Image (cartoon, rainbow, N blue to C red):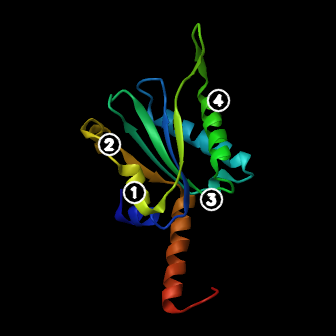
């Protein structure tokens, strides 16, 4: 990840931090990318937004078990971010992945956590935490990707800061 991307991530007004797992082992990067974009598209559609305009940062990694691949997202530009909307996001993800049945219950084919973003930790801190030594393997082989909208939001924020510092207002 380039230093410019690190700086860009901290200039964006993120709304949510999502951690998403799949029950399936050895999911490919392509599969995880497709699932993550399907989730972003569905959340945007529900909120009446164009998903291509939402700032998104994604990190795909391996967990404790290298075969257990998962991803994290930072998502910005949302209209509604409260608990009801986060619960709906969780339901969307469960519906995207589907369920498997056993004799007692329906079991989701993955899990998701949707948290409000807290800027005090910094965007990179969310995506780059290594929770324990076993997970360090996943971080060493992970990349953080920014959407085009995220890069644009960061550059607008940087340009506004430069204009303010130079005393230029309203341009």
Q: Nearer the viewer, mark 3 or mark 2?
A: 2
The residue at which mark 2 appears reads as 131
- Badge 1 density bin: few <14, some 14–19, many ≥20, Cα 10 Å: some
In the image, residue 63 above or below residue 55: above
Which is nearer the N-term, disc 4 or disc 2? 4
Residue plotted at (63% across, 85% down): 171
Which is nearer the N-term, disc 1 or disc 2? 1
Secondary element at tag 2? loop
Q: Nearer the viewer, residue 154 or 82?
A: 82
Q: Nearer the viewer, residue 132 or 148?
A: 132
Which is nearer the N-term, disc 1 or disc 3? 3
Cα separation, mark 1 vs mark 4, equals: 29 Å
Q: Position of residue 109 (x, y in %)?
A: 54, 24
The disc label shown at residue 95, or none: 4
Quadrant location of the N terminus in the rendered image = bottom left
Secondary element at tag 1? helix
The residue at which mark 3 appears reads as 77
Left or right: residue 151 versus residue 140 is right
- Badge 3 density bin: few <14, some 14–19, many ≥20, Cα 10 Å: many
The disc label shown at residue 124, or none: 1
- Badge 2 density bin: few <14, some 14–19, many ≥20, Cα 10 Å: few
Q: Position of residue 124 (x, y in %)?
A: 39, 57
Residue most extreme to the right:
48
Cα separation, mark 4 vs mark 2, equals: 28 Å
């Amino acid at each position: 990840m380039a230093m410019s991307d690190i700086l860009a991530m901290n200039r964006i007004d993120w709304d949510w931090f999502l951690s998403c797992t799949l029950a399936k082992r050895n999911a490919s990067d392509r599969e995880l990318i497709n699932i993550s974009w399907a989730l972003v598209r569905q959340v945007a559609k529900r909120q009446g937004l164009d998903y291509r305009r939402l700032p998104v940062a994604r990190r795909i990694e391996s967990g404790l078990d290298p075969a257990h691949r998962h991803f994290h997202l930072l998502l910005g530009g949302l209209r509604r971010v409260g608990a009801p909307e986060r619960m709906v996001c969780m339901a969307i993800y469960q519906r995207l992945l589907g369920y498997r049945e056993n004799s007692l219950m329906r079991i989701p084919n993955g899990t998701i956590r949707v948290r409000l973003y807290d800027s005090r930790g910094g965007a990179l801190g969310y995506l780059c935490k290594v929770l324990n030594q076993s997970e360090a393997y996943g971080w060493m082989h992970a990349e953080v990707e920014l959407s085009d909208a995220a890069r644009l939001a960061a550059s607008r924020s940087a340009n506004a800061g430069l204009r303010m510092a130079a005393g230029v207002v309203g341009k």
